[in-house]
Each structure stands twice: as structure tokens, then as C-alpha cells.
Amino acid sequence: MKMTKTLIATSCLVLAATLSPVTVNAADAGDAGQRAKTFVKDSAITTKVKAKLAAEKPSSLATVNVDTDASGVVTLSGTLKTKEEADKAVSIAHATEGVKSVTNNIKVSP
């Protein structure tokens, strides 16, 4: 009887040790899935902003760098010739679906 209890206890311990990594990896897979969804969302916002900038005249707005974080905050950077162009780029970004706020790091250099 004592041998049976020891065997059962050992079997349970081995089983628990074997399944623990599976549980941890399953949790990590959920986090990776969420990160992938966030990345797709960020990329979609960035693509929308870039497409709108590229469609504008002057075409120099297409040279603006666009980055979006997980919160929907768009950061614009690069160099444009006038403040009006920079303001227009910020306005376009603000008007884009999914954008929560815009950080303007555009430099003006005539």
C-alpha cells in the first residue's frame, strides 16, 4: 500500500512538472496574439496616414515619416519647406480614423 501511494505521488509530481511549461507557453501565446493584433492596428493607422499624405499636393508631404504606437498616438517626423505644409500634415493625421493624438516632430527648413 505504501508503495502504491509513493508511486501515485511520484506520478502526479512528474505530470505536474511536465504540464507546467505547457500552461506557461499557452499564456505566452495569448500575449503574442495580443501583440500581433496591436501591431496590425498600429500598421493600419500608419498606412492610412501615409496614404493620405501621399495623395496631397504638394507631394512633399509624402516624405513625412509616420509612426504609430499601441495607443493610437501618431508621431510625424522629417523635414518640410514651410510651416503650412507641416500644419497640413498634422491636420491630415488628426483626421485619420483610429488616431488618438499626434506628436509633431517635423522640422521646417526652406
Image: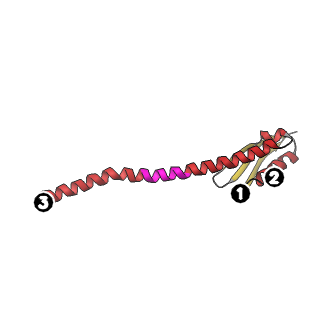
- Residue 100 image label: 1
101 or 55: nearer the eye?
A: 55
Quadrant in which the C terminus appears: top right
Secondary structure of the magenta portion, mostly? Answer: helix
Dot 1: element: loop
The quadrant holding residue 100 is bottom right
Sort mark 3 into few (<14), some (14-19) or many (20+) by Cα contacts within 10 Å: few
Task: Tell me whether circle 3 and circle 2 mark residues in contact (CB < 8 Å).
Answer: no
Per the rendered image, the range of residues in magenta is 25-34
- Residue 71 image label: none
Which residue matches tag 3? 2
Residue 58 in the image: x percent, y percent? 86, 41
- How far is mark 3 from mark 2, CA to CA? 78 Å
Return the disc, 3 or 2, that comes first in the chain's sequence.
3
Instruction: Residue type at mark 1: give it.
Output: Lys
39 or 110: nearer the eye?
A: 39
Residue 98 in the image: x percent, y percent? 70, 55
Sort mark 2 into few (<14), some (14-19) or many (20+) by Cα contacts within 10 Å: few
Give the residue at x 83% y 47%. 86
The quadrant holding residue 3 is bottom left
